[in-house]
Amino acid sequence: MNSIKKGNYAPIYLLMGTEPFFIDQVTNLLLTNVVEERARDFDLTILYGKDTIPEQIIETAKRFPMMGSHQLVVVREAQYLDRSLDQLLPYLKNPQAQTVLVFCFKHKKLDKRKKSYKSITKTGVILETKPLYEDQVATWIKDRGLKYGFNFHPHAIPLLVSFLGTDLSKIDKELQKLNNQLAAGQEITPLIIEKYIGYSKDFNGFELQKALGKRDLEHSFRIIRYMASNSKKHPITLTITILFNFFQKLLLFQGLPAPAKAPIVLGVSPYFVIDYQAAARFYSMKQIAQIIGHIKEADLKSKGVGVQNLPAEELLKELIIKIVTS
């Protein structure tokens, strides 16, 4: 991205992988920098892999810019060209110097054994993106928030991760929404998240793990009922992932020689170590290992393995009872 900002363009970019946010970021930067707005009708071409054949890409890429120093050719949904990309080899080996050709290969990776991949490694730039882990997403939100001038209450970032998961595009969209609504430098609190993103500060995956950490069956059931009635905002797969991560980290915490190392080992803020300390009094390592097994079983059931048409609320209630009675 720094090279693009300096005007040092590669003739070919292969942007591929399972985290589309970074692919969009690089593509948008190229769209902003390579062709001036006044020249876009002449020197910018957007193609779509579903509706494009290799010959059309080659023909377009071989044109010369009409108004600027470069023309930009962006092939969106390039994953649909997976089987025919090797037909572009003549161009990939000898690209037009005044053309910037971009392949957006989302949610998939180009086979590195293909001749087209090997050719791009020599003449262009390849970016492979992967989803961030949950603890990495928390750090990313904090850094991204700085861009918008936000300060975060200690509970705010875990709430965002609990609600939005690890989808960076979705998270950034919500941060932009907050940026449009709030004053610069305003602290992002659970109340603000509830107001502007529509998230309940009392009934969510983050509060569920806290309730289970205290073996509070009654409150856990209240949270589950609320979440089940708002299944679009609280999909069962996300809830199961949150519980798995919590008990996996609790198992790590139980094995620590000293709690002082917990923030680094668990990848959490020191503010939240107290939650693991509290839960460690209620669950032994043996119990936690059993609970992780129950969570994996619930994950399979949520995907239809071994059971049919079991409502999410009933599945989660069954899981919670197993956790609390372990």
Image (spheres, helix red, strand yellow):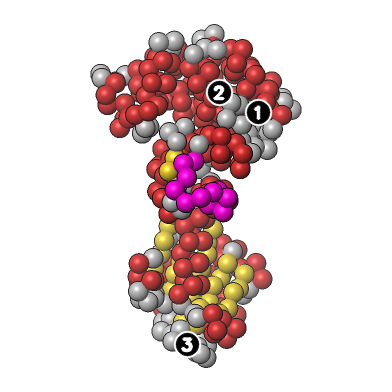
Left or right relative to 9: residue 293: right
Q: Amino acid at mark 3?
A: Gly
Q: Earlier in the sequence, mark 2 or mark 1?
A: 2
Determine which residue is flagged by label 3. 68
The label number, if any, that marks residue 227 in the structure image? 1
Q: Amino acid at mark 2?
A: Leu
Residue range in magenta is 178-188
Q: Amino acid at mark 1?
A: Met
* Tag count: 3
User: Compared with residue 137, is residue 216 higher up or lower down, i.e. above or below?
Assistant: above
Question: Seen from this angle, which residue lies furthest front?
Answer: 183
Q: Are dots 2 and 1 in contact, CB under 8 Å?
A: yes
Residue found 40% across the figure and 26% down from its top: 272
> In terms of secondary structure, where does tag 2 sit?
helix
Determine which residue is flagged by label 2. 208
> In x, y percent, where is residue 78?
56, 65
Residue found 43% across the figure and 25% down from its top: 248
CA distance for labels 3 and 1: 54 Å
CA distance for labels 2 and 1: 10 Å
